[in-house]
Amino acid sequence: MQGPVHPQVKAFASWLRKWGKLKLALVCQLLLLLFAVAATVIFNTVVSNQVNLPQVLAASGITLLLGPFFIAFLFYLVLHLDAALSYLEDSAHQERLLNEGMQDNIRQLNFEIEERKKAFQAKRRAIDELRKEIAERKKAQIELEEQSLLIRSIVDSSPDLFYYRDETGRFASCNKMFEAIMGKPASELIGRYPADIYTDDSAQAAILTEHELHMQPSELTLDVEFVKEDGQLLWFEMRKVPFYDRHGRYIGLLGFGRDITSRKLAEQALEKAYLDKGKFIATLSHELRTPLNGIVGLSRRLLESKLSKQQHGWANTIFSSAETLGNIFNDIIDLDKIDRQDLDIVYQSVSLRQFINDIANFAELLCQQKGLRFQLNGPNKVDYYLRLDPTRLRQVLWNLLNNAVKFTASGTVTLSWNLNDECNQLDFIVEDTGIGIAEQEQERIFDMYYKSNDGRRLSIIGSGIGLSVSRALVEAMQGRISVSSVIGKGSRFAVVLPTDIAQQEQQAAISCPELTVLLIEDVPLNAEIATGLLEQRGHSVILAETGEDAIALLETEDDIDLVLLDMQLPDMSGEQIAHYIRQEAHLATLPIVVLSANVRKAEQQLAGVQVDGALAKPINTTKLDQMLARLFSPSAVKAQHQPRADSDDEQQLLDFATLNDYIQSLGKDAMKRSVQLFAQLLPGYMNRLMETAVQRQQKDFQEAAHKLKGAAASVGLLWVQQQAKRFEQEPLSWQGLERQLVDFHLKTEQHLAALSEFIEQA
């Protein structure tokens, strides 16, 4: 019974606390009164079949008199019963908690007992292991001593020299070969500084030089020339490895030296032979191309003059032969670039009308020479400006048209084109009515040096590289080229290129007040170009070649209006100078414009410094004017530069946009002086590159490449600038680098000759 009563008592006690005794007593009294009245009425109805009102009133009175006593007794009984139940529940809960705590203590005690047993066993095992370790250490010490003796014997018998110097620079160890080369026994070397034993100009000092190695975080390998007392010349490949402790503190230097005299002499002989061969090829190429250009030009002039039919045929033969030979030269040059993965695509805003007309004129001339019909198909509206590489695309189309004419005896050569505005796609189709290509040959027609086995095609002279070069050029422009052909009916080559439609850009005049400009530039050629551009615009230029000079001028000169800041200087970086300017109160508002070949990189380096702009090297005059106008004439019209589409194949070598800009701004004489200055500085740049490459000094090599890159960009040597940029930024492979530099030097001289010729003809 305790089970059902318990929740009822708890519920009634809860109502009592919630409603209060008075309210609940009134409710209970009312319920009792209703119950008494109802019981009396039911009883009278059952007994006498009528309601006796006096009995009902009597029952109600008795209920009103006795009800409060009954309710009070009930409340008392419920409250005390609820308190007793709560006490019992709390006691039961405490008993459970106590039992649980005792069980936890018992488990913890059992666990500690087990852990102590395990600890005791582990202690016994540790003692056993310690005994074994002591025995093994004694054994290892004996073996180490034996190995040390063996290693010492091996080191002493090695044909390579070896030495070790501690953190103070004193000799700590060496082998027999090192003693022989140094000319002194180990007893006279160990514990002494090299300066105490040898003079700075001695042959031994060359072996021991570290080139500030203690400042380097990695090892260094370099070739060292050593002259013995009897005059014999030896070469050693010295490898020097610095040692650091776990805190990064320098603790010693380990040096190895291997006799590479025979290899060095062979390399020098090979380098001389390679240099002589390169000079011969460069001279021969220049000498051949010069008369070839004359043949092409004069034969074209002859074709335009009045000639007899026979003479016109002879002139046609001369012209086509020279053009073919020139195309083969171009294919060979591009093939070399493709092999070296140095093929550059330079996009420009190109007039589609002018471009199509140039190609059509060329194709029509080729077809006239062979008696073929030329047909041009395309939309009537061609007044578009597209973003293309005109030189590369022109080369591809010329190659396809040449082949079409070459393999067509009679009929028509057709050039069709279409511009899809929706997907920004330019399509070219070159069709002919020639001999065609067999289906099994079409899969290989773009392979290098491949020529069809068809006897009709073998009878026609060709290099077998034109289509391969064309495919490489199209793929470099993110396009695709395909072929379809039927034997005896002709061939169809399709070129699809992505492009963007651009608007013809207009130029507007820009005015700027006269300024005093502090030019901070350490490359003389760059400084001369920038100074000429600024002075030609009426500005005064103060030149500082080092950071120290720049800071001195900033402290003493009061009328400086603008700072043109090169990012790399001999003694400090452009970032340091910019920080200095912004930290000085009287210079805080001085405008700073950064000069860099890599504007994005320069902006990243100066992310925490406020600068007013950046100009890319070589300086574009229009962008220079825009920058000056933005800083000093805010109301001036912002002009934009319209790139010029060149049809000369030298676009891949020279930056015509920059060159034409400079020639118009500075004049031919100023450009000639700049080219002469570059020619004078070039041997120094190349010698520095070769020296740092031989010594494998990566940082110095990249600095030298950076200077050459800036100088080449200033005179429009595009290819030289890009190659120097690759040397500066790409990971270096020391293997074969010296030979690459020799070849680079030769090609730079060739490009310099082409630059001089272009300026003369401008």
Image: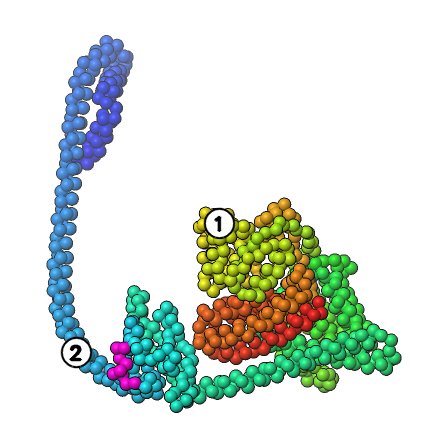
- Toward the viewer: 593 or 731? 593
Give left or right: position of 416 versus 110: right
The numbered disc on residue 203 is: none
Q: Amino acid at mark 1?
A: Leu
The image position of residue 567, as x and y in percent, is 50, 60
Q: Quadrant of the N terminus?
A: top left
Q: Residues within 10 Å of mark 1 (few under 14, many from 20)?
A: some
Q: Residue at x 52, y 64 (%)?
A: 522
Picture quadrant of residue 283: bottom right
Q: Residue 523 colored magenta?
A: no
Q: Is residue 212 above or below residue 517?
A: below
Q: Residue at x 51, y 87 (%)?
A: 269
Q: Residue 185 colored magenta?
A: yes
> Which residue bears the numbered disc 1?
587
Give left or right: position of 604 versus 355: left
Give left or right: position of 483 versus 29: right
- Toward the viewer: 262 or 504? 262
The image position of residue 75, as x and y in percent, is 18, 24
Give left or right: position of 198 versus 616: left
- Toward the viewer: 120 or 688? 688
Q: Residue at x 21, y 31 (%)?
A: 10
The image position of residue 137, as x and y in percent, is 18, 76
> Which residue bears the numbered disc 2?
138
Residue 111 in view of the camera: yes
Give the residues in magenta. 184-192
The image position of residue 84, as x and y in percent, is 14, 32
Which numbered disc flags the more N-terminal residue, 2 or 1?
2
Q: Residue at x 63, y 68 (%)?
A: 673
Picture quadrant of residue 366: bottom right
- Kindly state the secondary structure of the residue where label 2 is placed: helix
How much space separates mark 2 and mark 1, taking CA atoms? 71 Å
